Image (cartoon, rainbow, N blue to C red):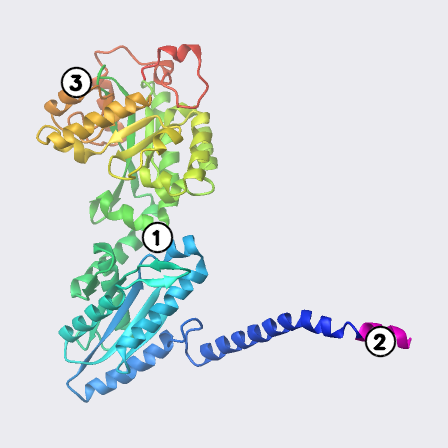
Amino acid sequence: MQGTLQYWLAYLPLLAILAAPTAIATWFAIQLHRERVLRRRDGADYLTGLPTRRAAASVAAQAILDSKHSANEFAVIVLNVDRLKPINDSLGHQAGDELLLGLAQRLRAILGHNHVLARLAGDEFTIIARELKGPRDAETLVNKITEAVREPFVIASFDIHTSLTMGISMYPLDGDTFDILLRRAEMALRVAKAASRGSYRFYALEMSNAADERLSLENDLRRAVELGQLELHYQPKVDIGTNRIRSAEALLRWRHPTRGLVPPNVFIPIAEDTGLIVQIGEWVLRDSCRQVRAWIDSGMSPVRVAVNLSAKQFRHVDLVAVIRSALEEAQLQPGYLELELTESAIMDDAEKSASTLEFLSTMGVHISIDDFGTGYSSLSYLRRFPLDKLKIDRSFVRDLMSSPADASIVKAIISLAHNLRLRVVAEGVETAEQLGYLRELGCDQYQGFFCSPAVPPSAFEALLQKLRADLPELTEADMLRTQSRLSAFSPESASSDR
């Protein structure tokens, strides 16, 4: 027994050496957790040690009292750290935390004791800039802050460059409480971010008017979805060589009960920002397919319908299931459906996009790139994805006859597409001269007011009957002859009109 005890006692020093690092690490972890708990309790941010929003509100409340007894003003400045997400993605969240910590230290060094820096959340900070004489003093401080972050931050042996986008509100001009001042500084920040990264804006009354108007539109749009105020109009795509209409683009319209037709460029961004675009996009898919089935059942010559997919809708996990369901409900073959996507939408996650597009193309759904020439700078995706068409953006077609540069771009796009076995659609064709030049260049199809604007279903049906009056009727086989890139190639499609 004594020998066994002595045997194990001999190993105690070794066991102590092995256990010591774990014990030390555990002790440090406990201390760090305790420090973070104390910081939160004391109103301090756990990462930077800066005051939190609640503490900033207390500072602002005191600044309001001080300003009432003096001629001084103060500013609420909201700062957003630009490019934090790419840094987190490439170097890891620890590098992002180091950047935020380094930024906080650098800003505190230039602000001194008179101005209070606080962290609101994530990549957003606020400064309560006290004892100012007016907006000019605030602007001087903002410029000083901008200069302070020009020098790179050294993180993980990398020089990290960033910038700050800022929004500013002034007391008492822009509000008499911290909540109002903060909200209006954030409005100014959103305007600055929309203008350019690294810029700043002072709050102005029209920003509130715009925000109120946007909120009103957002509420109305939610009701529009529930009450069925959305509708689809259809614009024909005309084959330039034969003057036939084989397909049409479904375009969303909102008929507001008091505003009338709300332009898509007004309500689509709201739908994108709120996430309503996924629900609306599914309705567009299903209603477009139902409309094509209704036209076929009425005896009208068949057409393919093209539907725009937003980036959010394209990335939605149920996209393929929704498309399959829409086609099955309408009893349509996949060849009746064409999906239009922007370059940026498919390049956001290239590998996942390739998989989704391959599946849809194999089903028989056609894939088009919308607004080609205005998005992604690399053209390598053209050979990576199973695409069927490129749509030349209307900005190039608009000045086709007056701008040699635009004419060269259009010519190059058509040549590139045909070399890759893709068809080309020109958007925004308004004159016979534009159409004639596109015909000379070998463009396959066009859309635009020269043929027709987007019109309601009944008007589109009448237009189609009028334009097809002197041409032999198209059959279903004619319409489906042009197959999607990855669908089964049959002998009948050997004479395809590609």
Query: Residue 440 shows which numbered tag?
Result: 3
Categorize mark 3 by other alpha carbons within 10 Å: few (<14), some (14-19), many (20+).
few
Return the residue at label 1: 274
Residue shown at 23%/55% (left/top)? 194
- 134 or 229: nearer the eye? 134
Mark toward the start of the polypeptide (1 vs 2): 2
Residue 24 as seen in the image, left or right of residue 8: left
- 245 or 494: nearer the eye? 494
Amino acid type for the residue under numbered disc 2: Gln
Image coordinates of residue 211 in percent, x first then y, are: 24, 60
The image quadrant of residue 238 is top left
Question: CB atoms at circles 1 and 3 under 8 Å apart?
Answer: no
Residue 317 as seen in the image, left or right of residue 441: right
Mark toward the start of the polypeptide (1 vs 3): 1
Distance in Å between CA atoms under marks 1 and 2: 72 Å
Amino acid type for the residue under numbered disc 1: Thr
3 part of magenta stretch = yes
The boundaries of the magenta stretch are 1-9
Residue 462 as seen in the image, left or right of residue 358: left
Tell which tag, 1 or 2, sits nearer the viewer. 2
Give the farthest residue toward the right: 1
